[in-house]
Image (tube, grey):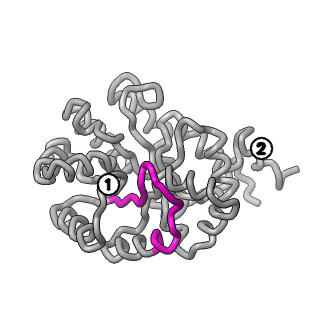
Amino acid sequence: MSNAFELPPREGKPRKRGLTTMVDFGPDEMGWTGGPGGIESLLKCAADYIDYAKIYALNGLLLPEETVKEAAKLYRDYDCHPFAGGMLFEYAYAKNQLDEFDTLLRREELMGFEISENYITLEDDERKGLIDRFQKAGFDVVYEFGRKAPTEPMKLEELGAVIHSVGECGIEHVIVEQSEIDMLAESSTTGLDELRRQNWFDQIVIEADPYRFPQQHAGLIKQFGPDVNLCNIASGQVLRLEGFRRGIGRAVEYCIMDDLI
């Protein structure tokens, strides 16, 4: 045991496991306050614990472009990779305005975005074609699997096939939609255990529900371990989540003390 008075180490950035993707809701009760200055205050304290920062839903259109541009720069400055959430892409796809979508993100200097299929449906060749198109245009592409309103539990073999397919495009992690995780857990008492046993489990990032913090988040850590990849962590939850990963907090029963006493 080290004589230094410090917490047990955790893998630093860039991480392959234990990723935390923060969702930037903008100036609301679960987001930042005081404009981009609020983001910088957060990053000065917690940037080491934020791997990615997702600009929520259609905030790329709702917020002033200069605000998004400034926020994206701050995240880059602190090595927290920013990207636009998938609904912005889906909205542009449904309107047949992907060129305009490209132009908007360039104006905002937000050169990362999520391709999702919450409402639209892409065939494998089209999905890979879109990923290739935007990667060649200089964008960092994130992929999310699943529907916002699934009608049946996801099939793990289907998720595995998608992970393999987008992996051929260089995408190392796939976000799994919160609703899909919820339905899998509700449909089978062993569903989450089966998910954990897949050989590609470390390649998924599980969406948590910010409105079920801290119980759900602590439960995910107990279920999958402290190095589970998690997404949609609200700005005010980042530091406490890092504590949970390290066994700090009543929600995880202060298990950091287990081996000391």
How many numbered markers are drawn?
2
At which x and y percent is residue 148?
42, 49
Q: Is residue 172 above or below residue 28?
A: below
Which residue is the site of mark 1? 114
Which residue is the site of mark 2? 253
Q: Amino acid at mark 1?
A: Glu
Q: Which mark is residue 260?
A: none
Q: Is residue 256 above or below residue 27?
A: below
* Horizontal side of residue 26 vs 62, given as left or right: right
* Horizontal side of residue 233 vs 10, given as left or right: left
Do the numbered discs 2 and 1 sit on residues whose CB atoms are within 8 Å?
Answer: no
Residue 125 is inside the magenta segment:
no
Q: Is residue 167 above or below residue 21?
A: below
Q: Is residue 125 above or below residue 249?
A: below
Q: Earlier in the sequence, mark 2 or mark 1?
A: 1
Question: Dot 1, how many residues are within 10 Å of its Cα: few (below 14), some (14-19), or many (20+)?
Answer: many
Question: Dot 2, how many residues are within 10 Å of its Cα: few (below 14), some (14-19), or many (20+)?
Answer: few
* Horizontal side of residue 184 vs 261, given as left or right: left
